[in-house]
Image (spheres, grey):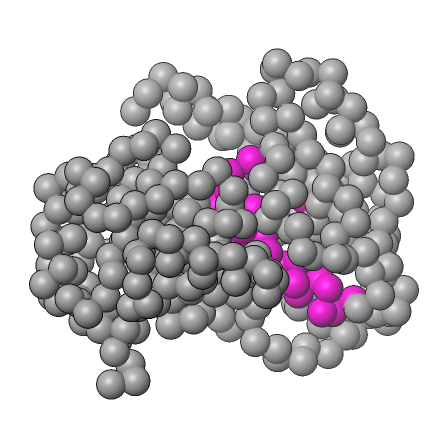
Amino acid sequence: MSFKIKINNYRRKIMHALTKRVGASYVEPQKGDLHIKDIKKVLIIRPNHRLGNQLLLTPLVQEVIRTFPRCQVDLFVKGGVAHPVFENYKEVSEIIKLPKKPWSNLFKYIKCWISIKSRSYDLVINADKNSSSGRLLTELANAKFKIFGDVDESIISKYEDYKHISKYPVYNLRHYLEVLGIEDEHQKMPLLDIKLNAAEISNGKKVLYGITKNDKKTICIYTNATGNKCYSETWWETFYARLQKEYPEFNIIEMLPIENISRINFKAPNFYSEDIREMASIFRNTSIFIAADNGVMHLASASLTPTVGFFSVTTVDIYKPYGNGSVALHTDKTNIEDWITAIDNILRKDG
C-alpha cells in the first residue's frame, strides 16, 4: 500500500470519527409534513470526481425526478465529469463542482462550500453514506427535509441488493418518504443511464462501422483498470484467444485507455476517444461490453449495453453492473468456462 493511500485511509477514518454525530441534532419531520407537489428544488451531494461514481449517481437522480415531477435538481460534485454525464438530464439545473485538487484551488474550494449556505432547497440528499464531507454539507444546507445517507435497518432486512452503491440511496429515499406518509409505489430500480439521444446513437454506429468495416455484431473489451483491479497481459491474452475461438461470427474490438496501452498487445481492432458520450454511443451499438471493474465498465452499463464485469478485489455486491442482462463474475470463484457460459447467455439468448 502506497504512502498516499495510507494517508487517505487515515484521513477518512479521522473524518468519519469527527462527523459520525453530524445530523444528530436535526429535527426529523413528522408524517404528513412532506407533500410531493411542494418539493421543487432538490440538492444531491456526491463530492467525488471519478467517472464511475458520477455514473453510479444516475439512478438516484432518476428516482428524484420520477418522484418529484415538478422539481429541479442541483448536484454538488467534484471535478467536471458530471457535466457530460448529466448533459441530457433537463431537470438538472446546476452542477456545483468542487475543484478536483482542493489544495491547489483552496479559495474556490472554500467558496463552493460557503455557496451551499446561501441557497435554499426543499430536500437535500447525501448520496454516499461513507462521505464525511457529504454529511457535513447536508448539515450545512438550508432545507426542511434532509437525508444524511444512513441505511435504515428495515432496508437491510428487506432488500438483498441494498449494499449496491447505486441502489441503497434509492431505497433510502423511498423509506424516508414512506415514513413521512408517501406510499411506496414499488417502481423498478432505475438503471445507470447516461441518456444517449438518437443522434448520438446514430453517430456511434457510424464510428463503430469505421472500426470494423462490416455489419457483423460486435464484442467490445477494455483491458485496463486501476491498481490491483487490473489483470495481467497473460490473463487477457488467454481470454481474448478464447473469445476468438468461441465467437468467430462476431467482431472483437478493444477500447483503449488514455495511456494507449493494450493487455492483448493491440491484436484486436481498437479505438480511443476522450469524449465519454461518444464512447458510450459506440458501446450502445455493440452486443456486449467486457471489462474489469472500473469507470468505463460503468459507462458501458450506463449506455444500456449488456455488460460483463470481472471482479477480484472490489466487492461485487457494491459495484456490479446490473440491468440489460449484465453480469458480474468474481474471477477467484469462477473459471473461464463460467465466463464463456455467462457471455453465451447474453450473446445467444435468442438462440
* Residue 53 visible: no
The residue at 31%/58% (across/down) is 213
Query: Which quarter shows the N terminus?
Result: top left
- Please state which of residues 209 and 40 is positioned toward the viewer in this rendering: 209
- Please state which of residues 109 and 212 is positioned toward the viewer in this rendering: 212
Q: Percent position (x, y) of residue 32?
A: 86, 71
Query: Which quarter shows the C terminus?
Result: bottom left
- Please state which of residues 238 and 36 is positioned toward the viewer in this rendering: 238
Task: Report the side of 228 relative to 139 (left or right).
Answer: left
The residue at 85%/49% (across/down) is 121
Of helix, strand and loop, which mostly describes the magenta segment? Answer: helix
Up-down: is 60 above or below 350? Answer: above
Q: Percent position (x, y) of residue 312?
A: 25, 48
Q: For residue 56: magenta?
A: yes
Q: For residue 319: magenta?
A: no
Chain part drawn in magenta: 45-68
Q: Percent position (x, y) of residue 154?
A: 56, 68
Q: Residue furthest bottom?
A: 351
The residue at 39%/24% (across/down) is 5
Number of marks in the image?
0
* Residue 288 visible: yes
Task: Report the side of 170 relative to 310 (left or right).
Answer: right
The residue at 86%/59% (across/down) is 40
- Please state which of residues 164 and 218 is positioned toward the viewer in this rendering: 218
Q: Quadrant of residue 41?
A: bottom right
Q: Percent position (x, y) of residue 136?
A: 70, 36
